[in-house]
Amino acid sequence: MRRWKTLLPTVMMLGLGGCASVPAGSSTAEDPLQSYNRTMFGINDTLDRHVIKPVAEGYRAVAPDFVRAGVTNFFANLSDLSTTVNDFLQGKVRQGGVDGGRFLLDTTVGIFGLFDVATPVGLERHHEDFGQTMAVWGWENSSYFVIPILGPSTLRDSLGLVGEYPWTIYPYLNTTWTKQIEIGSVDVLNTRTNLLAASNVLDTAALDPYAFMRDAYLQRRRNLIYDGHPPPSPDDE
């Protein structure tokens, strides 16, 4: 779901920019698994439309804004710990200090991250994960890959989820797998609720939603890997 969180600005940007003309089958060099990916995209989309999205809409209807904001802040604070680790793995020492400071401040003063007190004092949130770290280490290009339920990714970023796991809350919960799944489901549900507007853009803007989502995801990930200053791609040249 972290990939979806970082995808939101790009989906909104491309949708409002009129990317309905994205052609099916574009960027096939980055999508050699397109047959599988389109099938899994269809399965995920069906599951989302009939189960996840309706539940998210119900959650938005009954949960007050401050409750949803607190849940969002809590899980975002946990992601700051992973970001801090990946900052240092990528050699971003100063940024690692900022993100580590965010995590400590929000965990303590912000009551386990329920309140974001770091942003108002000037500690900007960054987004780094192990998929980006592997790209910095040399695995720059990777084939697009749709993960069951979780959605858009690449082979590199999917493997990166394994590297992310030790820095999540789940390995340290002294509870059953059932409880861990319940906690993870809260994160998924809250994230999906925050993405309702973006999914509406996707539904109305794209002639080919699969290609739209793929290209938006790959563009956003490339932007994150190069910290907002990606070099020209071969297609651009």
Image (cartoon, helix red, strand yellow):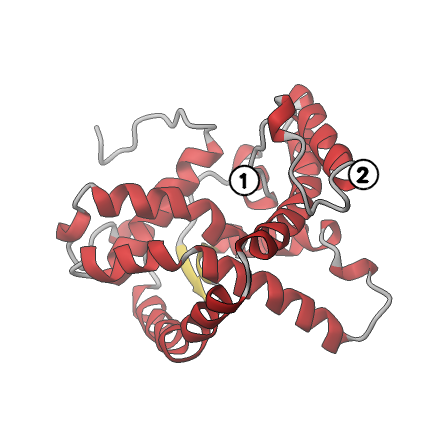
Query: Is disc 1 placed on a helix, strand or loop?
Result: helix
Name the residue carrying label 1: 132
Tell me whether circle 1 and circle 2 mark residues in contact (CB < 8 Å).
Answer: no
Residue 67, percent from left and from top:
60, 56
Residue 75, percent from left and from top:
64, 51
Name the residue carrying label 2: 108
Q: CA distance from mark 1 to mark 2?
A: 28 Å
Q: Is residue 95 above or below residue 15?
A: above
Residue lying furthest left: 21
* Amino acid marked by disc 1: Gln
Residue 52, percent from left and from top:
45, 73
Residue 237, percent from left and from top:
21, 28
Residue lying furthest top: 94
Query: Based on the displayed image, in which of its 4 quarters is residue 180 positioned?
Result: bottom right
Residue lying furthest right: 174
Name the residue rendered at 46%, 61% in the picture: 193
Name the residue rendered at 18%, 47% in the picture: 19
Q: Is residue 142 above or below residue 178?
A: above
Name the residue rendered at 67%, 72% in the picture: 182
Residue 22 makes an appearance in the image? no
Q: Is residue 14 above or below residue 50?
A: above
Residue 92 makes an appearance in the image? yes
Query: Is disc 2 placed on a helix, strand or loop?
Result: helix
Q: Is residue 201 above or below residue 229?
A: below
* Amino acid marked by disc 2: Thr
Name the residue rendered at 44%, 79% in the picture: 51
Q: Using the image, tell me which numbered label, if any, was put on residue 202.
A: none
Relative placement, left or right, of 30 versus 89 is left
Q: Nearer the viewer, mark 1 or mark 2?
A: 2
Residue nearer the viewer, 51 or 114: 114
